[in-house]
Image (spheres, coloured by chain):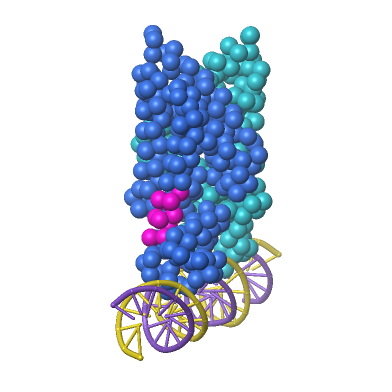
Chain colours: A blue, B cyan, C purple, D yellow
Amino acid sequence: MARDLQAYILDVASDLFYRQGIKNTGVDAIVKAAGTTKMSLYKYYPSKDDLVLAHLHKSREAIRELLLQGLEKQADPQQKLLAIFDVFADLQADPSFRGCPFINAAAEFAEQGGAVQQAAADYTKAFRKLMADLARQAGIVQADELAGQLAMLIAGAMASEQIQKGSGAMINARKAGEILIAAAQAGASE
Amino acid sequence: MARDLQAYILDVASDLFYRQGIKNTGVDAIVKAAGTTKMSLYKYYPSKDDLVLAHLHKSREAIRELLLQGLEKQADPQQKLLAIFDVFADLQADPSFRGCPFINAAAEFAEQGGAVQQAAADYTKAFRKLMADLARQAGIVQADELAGQLAMLIAGAMASEQIQKGSGAMINARKAGEILIAAAQAGASE
DNA sequence: TTGAAACTATACAGACCGGTATGTATTATT
DNA sequence: AATAATACATACCGGTCTGTATAGTTTCAA
């Protein structure tokens, strides 16, 4: 066991960062939870910041995988757009849900232009691009505009559910998404 | 000057909390910025948590005032709903904008059921109620549903603009809001 | 003028933070 | 058996955090 300690440390740290917040999670707590020592941790992650960035990268990849997995079940681009809501609805159903890791990290790290802020910005850009591409495939002309709107609905639903658990925000967001998609489709034909 | 030191301390603390984040702002920094001492601060605010809660209360009142101010310019309930987007768009235009104080605070204070989380939940509930009442006045049957959707758009636009400044997210959110309101109006007559 | 209240100044306590130093045990390869 | 890599154990460093203790200063009203 403990094969690939580096990955295991990241697993533990990522979980604690997400559940307790990043600044609230000390290196000692990670070390103890992972059953290892500071020396080993600092061998793989020369600073806590490196570990934080690895955590964000891991979170991004995890969401990416969930999205691809949810999208491949649908053939129609329009249905794929709606499937994104379903993926996030599943995420929120998990009792360990505590909001969007990137929004949370951006709130914790206020320094503008810092690496954390940059990582959050990169993620949201990639997310919007994914949606915009799908919208274009669905024949929507104002694809970027629609993608931005849908992304805002999802981000808002994440925040809403984080602050008030069990509100079923994402289901309502999906309803709004359907209306906006239909409107964008209709607007394109005018 | 320094008339009503208590209020002045809160002003300074609230500004620093919002700009730098709460956990990133030490009591010493507040004391220095306010030109006072720890003893005076702790006289009025027995703990940092008290100061944080006062900051959230102040933020809530400030937004409430801005909203009422923006709403009274419109007579039509439907126009009032849209005016809310404009109020937040003005907020985002300020270079010191750094997201929603409540979303940020909820991200920083992960402890569930804590006073900070509660304050954030109370605020969002009151905000949704305000919008739902307006929607009802506009003759919309599914007022709560629409209010939730509009609130998510606004929250998402706040987060989006925080992470990527100058994206003009709130303007796009307003466009989406118009569509959703129109759809809710039409849906009511069916 | 005196005396209480408000405020300042400063030092300190105790805990926690990120990060380092030193040394040891285990394991695998050669 | 010798070597090297990996991980563990533990103690420590300087700094920062919230919060308190002690003492001196201003203000203002009776």
Tell which of A99 and B186 is nearer to you: A99
Number of numbered markers: 0
Tell which of A40 and D17 is nearer to you: A40
Q: Residue at x 35, y 48 (%)?
A: A118
Q: Position of residue A167 (x, y in %)?
A: 64, 36
Tell which of A51 and B16 is nearer to you: A51
Quarter of the image with the C terminus of chain B is top right
Q: Is residue A110 in view?
A: no
Quadrant of residue C29 within the rendered picture: bottom left
Q: Residue at x 55, y 27 (%)?
A: A174
Q: Residue at x 56, y 56 (%)?
A: A20
Q: Position of residue D1 (x, y in %)?
A: 35, 91
**Residue A53 lies within the magenta run:** yes
Q: Position of residue B153 (x, y in %)?
A: 51, 31
Answer above or below: position of B5 versus C15: above
Tell which of D10 and B174 is nearer to you: D10
Q: Residue at x 66, y 39 (%)?
A: A166
Answer above or below: position of D23 versus C15: below
Q: Position of residue B89 (x, y in %)?
A: 44, 32
Bounds of the magenta segment: A50-59
Q: Is residue A127 in view?
A: yes
Quadrant of residue B168 within the rendered picture: top left
**Residue B21 lies within the magenta run:** no
Is A46 on the left or on the right of B46, as rendered? left
Q: Main secondary structure of the magenta part?
A: helix
